[in-house]
Amino acid sequence: MTNQTTVAILGAGSMAEALIGGIAKTNGGKAPHITVLNANNRKRLNQLHAAYGVHAAQSYEEAVKGKDVIVLAIKPHNVQEVADLLVSLLNPQKQLVISVAAGIKLETLESWLPAETAVIRAMPNTSARVLASATTLSIGTYATEWQLAFAKTLFSSIGTVTVIDEQQMDAATGIAGSGPAYIYYVAEAMLNAAIAEGLSPTEARALINQTIGGAAKQLADSGKSPKDLYKEIMSPNGTTEAAIAHLDHSSAQELFQQAIHQAVKRSAAIGASFERDAIHKHP
């Protein structure tokens, strides 16, 4: 992505800032080619302007007119309202709309926007802030291969990109979209246990951060399965075996898998609810 590419980001929450921060890091820390709009929080826009040099728009018209890409980085329940506001402002022949709203299907987005609008659905995660997002993309009916390549370039500036069929997007949301939270949850358990065992919070965080980072690198670089890797650490009657045996006895892995399935189901339910709304609006 270059500074000549103009991007409007609608929304100024954690995902919007993750995107802005990641893109800014590839452009010397600033992103003046990005315009941001948050209709309800001017103070937040001023903070983003000060931090990243983005342009803080005053209106939807100012935000989207003439921009190459419009990113919908807003809560799912706000997307239809914003889409209604964009209908008279978008140029479907020249602009690409990318949605990062969890659960809302491409068909639903296309029904809310002007006819033949190019739409791509994206699911980055908050690791975008450190240029380590695992982003999935699905292409809409009217988006071209060139536009998909453009979106891949955009999101590659904040991590890796995987293009998938939309029918797999709920699974990707449950795994990668929510995934960082699962790792932080495990890290919290490790931190609490470490402190209970007498380590200071500072000591514990240093050990945990490096341990998680090192394990992730080993998983990525070795080509081995997670099970192979944790079995390599286990020795008979050793410390790791004691820990894993306790987790297995508690059905921890099954519980974790069930939790992820709940996230996937919730993503699908969100999509279904908006799909019903779209049918009611456009019978």
Image (cartoon, grey):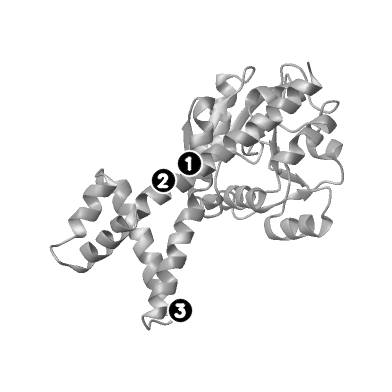
CB of mark 3 within 8 Å of CB of mark 2?
A: no
| 167 lies left or right of 17 | left
CB of mark 1 within 8 Å of CB of mark 3?
A: no
CB of mark 2 within 8 Å of CB of mark 1?
A: yes
Q: Residue at x 19, y 60 (%)?
A: 234
Q: Nearer the viewer, residue 15 or 144?
A: 15
Q: Which amino acid type is marked by label 3?
A: Pro
Judged from the image, the secondary structure of the residue bearing numbered disc 3 is helix
Residue 219 visible? The answer is: yes
Gap between marks 1 and 3, in whole Å? 32 Å
| 189 lies left or right of 53 | left
> Picture coordinates of residue 282 (x, y %)?
79, 18
Q: Nearer the viewer, residue 6 or 174?
A: 174
Q: Nearer the viewer, mark 1 or mark 3?
A: 1
> Picture coordinates of residue 160 (x, y %)?
46, 41
| 32 lies left or right of 221 | right
Q: What is the crowding at mark 1: few (fewer than 14 residues within 10 Å), some, or many (at least 20)?
A: some
Q: Nearer the viewer, residue 259 or 51?
A: 259
> Picture coordinates of residue 131 (x, y %)?
51, 50
Q: Earlier in the sequence, mark 3 or mark 2?
A: 3
Q: What is the crowding at mark 2: few (fewer than 14 residues within 10 Å), some, or many (at least 20)?
A: few
Quarter that holds the C terminus? top right
Q: Which amino acid type is marked by label 1?
A: His
Query: Tag on residue 261?
Result: 1
Residue to which mark 3 is pinned: 201
Residue 1 visible? The answer is: no
Q: Residue at x 40, y 79 (%)?
A: 196
Q: In the picture, residue 79 is in which quadrant?
A: top right
Query: Tag on residue 257?
Result: 2
Q: Residue at x 36, y 55 (%)?
A: 252
Q: Residue at x 83, y 47 (%)?
A: 39
Judge whether 85 appears above or below 129 on screen.
above
